[in-house]
Amino acid sequence: AKGYKNLTSKDWFFPVHFPGDPNMPGLLQIESLVQMSALTVLTLPGNKGKIVYLAAAKNIKLSRKVLEGERLNIKIELLSWKRGVGTCSGIGIVEDQTACRADFTIVMPDVIDRYRVKS
């Protein structure tokens, strides 16, 4: 999946993160990757409108500040999707430079429940 976030002066975090050096918080950069990861599985047949949660994130790397007026281009690869558990790899790019990257495990409880062992 591919998407983007245009950063503007209207984004709530610029005035508070950090005064005198405004930039997009690293955790929000990673959250943007997670949200795009969720979209990759929500577009699969039968998944529209379901809930997706982040279960794990690893190999997180923040490489560059993301500033007001820039566009964070988001690229996600769904590596595996089985029984409501997905693994994804994502990267955020600004002006042909890597800004952030991470690997994720996402879960869709509605699907997982169908495979839960009944007692």
Image: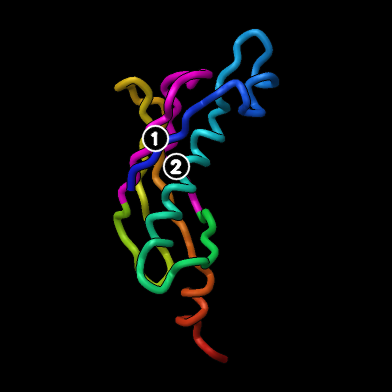
Kind of residue sitting beneath label 1: Arg
Q: How far apart are marks 1 and 2 (CA)?
A: 8 Å
Disc 2 crowd rating (10 Å Cα; few below 14, some 14-19, many 20+) is many
Image coords of residue 62 (percent x, y)? 45, 27
The mark lying in front, picked from 1 and 2, is 2
| Magenta stretch, residue numbers | 56-77
Residue 114, above or below 59: below
| First in residue order: circle 1 vs circle 2 | 2
Identify which residue is drawn at 48% across, 21% down. Answer: 66
Identify which residue is drawn at 33% across, 21% down. Answer: 97
Residue 54 is left or right of residue 4, and the answer is right
Q: Residue furthest bottom?
A: 119
Identify which residue is drawn at 36% across, 71% down. Answer: 45
Per the image, is 74 magenta?
yes
Where is mark 1, residue-wise?
Answer: 101
Image coords of residue 35 (percent x, y)? 49, 48
Where is mark 2, residue-wise?
Answer: 33
Disc 1 crowd rating (10 Å Cα; few below 14, some 14-19, many 20+) is many
Kind of residue sitting beneath label 2: Leu
Identify which residue is drawn at 38% across, 37% down. Answer: 74
